[in-house]
Image: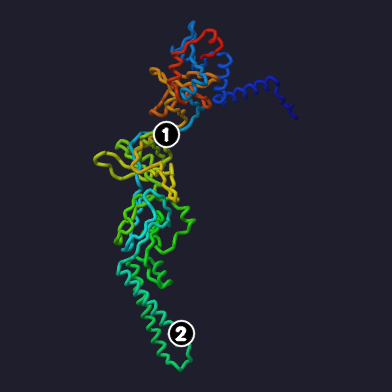
């Protein structure tokens, strides 16, 4: 037996459609309500819910005749006079911070590079001056070698090399003669003599290395068969363990590959310690270079903030900083490490964060020398914001966006050509930012005044309204 096919009636379809519409409206409530609220207020000229709430507390400005005005309209000139800025409200995470003192510091073993003389000699030329930019491989100094011990060691090495050359030629001559004419014993004796000369050459080579010459310099003596008379000192590569002697290879006419220099960190000659004509001993400091491209932000957390500091380092929360003289906030600074001791005098715990640096200004001389000014400098004082707690789904506005009147706090929401005053609940404020409760007083997408809220409140309280103008909803 076949059952009859069920067809929904028109009443059922209508009821189902209404349920779907109501459900869709409820799901998108947060999206369309701000626009509906603004549209209704603009059409009727009546205050919205926030305004009515303010009226109940008696905080609105009254028109002649007893009506309450809780909005203000600004001319273009007034906006410019107070430097008014507006922005959309958004909901997101907020990190509560505490301020601790800080200072820009050098990275030990990384920022400062000491360039020392590897050999005793006389400075015959200086190629850089304090404050100048240098790249790894740039020529800094030329030394004339005058230490007798180095000269005698080179002479002995050259004599041994020449003696080996003579033995090689003699052995080749004897081996070219027909067998039997020259006894084989003579050839063996010459080879044995060459072996002794090779042993002496290796010993003299080690002596030159101990006196401060590099292997490349010794090889150059072998190739040119000339004494090394001068020593070229070039800027080292930062953080390169192979450049610990800080002199490159010291060969006359040699520089690092240009592509390597261009891609390397830029150094500045921080301090020049010698002049032309100075006689120096091995190990004397010639100059000090500084690599300021990456510094430390040294913060000092108080003992009560030690747990917060440990939590921030463990969870990878970045810190931020603000220069004491003012300026932009420097954010997203990674904590490098936290020291394991508390300062006995200040009772503070020192921590360091990486501080990337940039060149703020640079001048050039007529001969092409460049003198940079870095944005951050060691010794510069900072206020470090140490993250303590993270809150989700909060409305965060600048402190200047909040107007205060007794226990009440207000935000001015842009509504067409005017600004409506909305009471809000401020959950937290630190002088620069304010956290607004996400309780429906503001909605994502609302455009609010980001500054000048106090001036708007004073203007609202002091404004006078012409009845004929107020009837049209305009204020001047």
Residue 172 marker: 2
- Rendered view: 33 above or below 247: above
Residue in the foreground of this view, choosing between 318 and 82: 82
Residue in the foreground of this view, choosing between 182 and 126: 126
State the scheme by which the image is colored. rainbow
Task: Classify residue 407 by image quadrant.
Answer: top left
Rendering coords of residue 108 (x, y %): 34, 49
Rendering coords of residue 85 (x, y %): 49, 26
Q: Residues within 10 Å of mark 2 (few under 14, many from 20)?
A: few
User: Distance between the Cα atoms at labels 2 and 1?
Assistant: 83 Å
Secondary structure at numbered mark 1 = strand
Q: Residues within 10 Å of mark 1 (few under 14, many from 20)?
A: few
Residue in the foreground of this view, choosing between 222 and 54: 222
Residue 455 seen? yes
Outermost residue to the left: 345
- Which residue, given by chain and number where applicable, does mark 1 sit on? 95
- Rendered view: 187 above or below 340: below
- The quadrant of the image that shows the N terminus is top right
Residue 1 seen? no
Residue found at x 29% / y 37%: 303
Query: Which mark is nearer the camera, 2 or 1?
Result: 2
CB under 8 Å between discs 2 and 1: no
Total label count?
2
Secondary structure at numbered mark 2 = helix
Residue 213 marker: none
- Which one is earlier in the sequence, the residue at label 2 or at label 1? 1
Rendering coords of residue 276 (x, y %): 33, 57
Task: Classify residue 350 by image quadrant.
Answer: top left
- Rendered view: 434 above or below 462: below
Residue found at x 39% / y 37%: 321
Rendering coords of residue 375 (x, y %): 41, 41
Outermost residue to the bottom: 180
């Amino acid at each position: 037996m076949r059952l009859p096919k069920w067809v929904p009636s028109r009443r059922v379809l209508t009821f189902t459609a209404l349920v779907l519409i109501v459900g869709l409206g409820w799901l998108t409530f947060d999206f369309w309500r701000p626009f509906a609220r603004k549209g209704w207020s603009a059409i009727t000229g009546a205050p919205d819910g926030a305004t009515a709430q303010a009226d109940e507390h008696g905080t609105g400005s009254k028109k002649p005749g007893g009506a309450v005005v809780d909005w203000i309209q600004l001319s273009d000139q007034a906006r410019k006079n107070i430097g008014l800025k507006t922005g959309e409200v958004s909901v997101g995470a907020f990190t509560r911070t505490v301020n601790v003192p800080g200072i820009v510091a050098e990275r030990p073993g990384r920022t400062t590079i000491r360039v020392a003389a590897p050999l005793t000699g006389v400075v015959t030329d200086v190629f850089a001056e304090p404050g100048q930019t240098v790249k790894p491989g740039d020529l800094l100094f030329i030394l004339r070698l005058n230490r007798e011990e180095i000269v005698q060691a080179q002479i002995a090495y050259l004599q041994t090399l020449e003696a080996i050359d003579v033995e090689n030629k003699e052995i080749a001559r004897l081996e070219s003669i027909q067998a039997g004419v020259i006894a084989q014993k003579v050839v063996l004796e010459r080879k044995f003599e060459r072996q002794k000369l090779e042993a002496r050459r290796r010993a003299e080579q080690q002596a030159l290395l101990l006196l401060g010459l590099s292997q490349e310099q010794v090889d150059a003596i072998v190739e040119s068969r000339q004494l090394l008379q001068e020593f070229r000192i070039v800027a080292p590569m930062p953080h390169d363990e192979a450049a610990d002697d800080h002199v490159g290879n010291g060969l006359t006419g040699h520089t690092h590959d240009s592509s390597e220099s261009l891609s390397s960190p830029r150094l500045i000659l921080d301090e020049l310690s010698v002049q032309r004509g100075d006689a120096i001993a091995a190990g004397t400091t010639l100059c000090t270079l500084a690599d300021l491209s990456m510094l430390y932000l040294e913060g000092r957390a108080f003992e009560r903030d030690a747990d917060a500091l440990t939590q921030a380092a463990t969870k990878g929360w970045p810190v931020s900083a603000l220069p004491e003289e003012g300026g932009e906030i420097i954010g997203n600074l990674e904590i490098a490490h936290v020291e394991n001791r508390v300062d006995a005098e200040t009772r503070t715990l020192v921590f360091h964060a990486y501080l990337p640096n940039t060149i703020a200004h640079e001048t050039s001389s007529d001969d092409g020398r460049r003198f940079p000014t870095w944005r951050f400098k060691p010794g510069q004082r900072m206020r470090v914001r140490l993250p303590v707690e993270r809150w989700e789904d909060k409305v965060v506005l600048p402190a200047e966006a909040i107007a205060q009147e007794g226990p009440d706090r207000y935000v001015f929401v842009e509504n067409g050509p005017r600004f409506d005053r909305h009471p809000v609940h401020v959950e937290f404020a630190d002088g620069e930012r304010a956290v607004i409760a996400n309780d429906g007083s503001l909605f994502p997408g609302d455009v609010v005044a980001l500054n000048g809220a106090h001036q708007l409140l004073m203007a609202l309280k002091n404004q006078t309204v012409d009845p004929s103008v107020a009837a049209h909803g305009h204020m001047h």
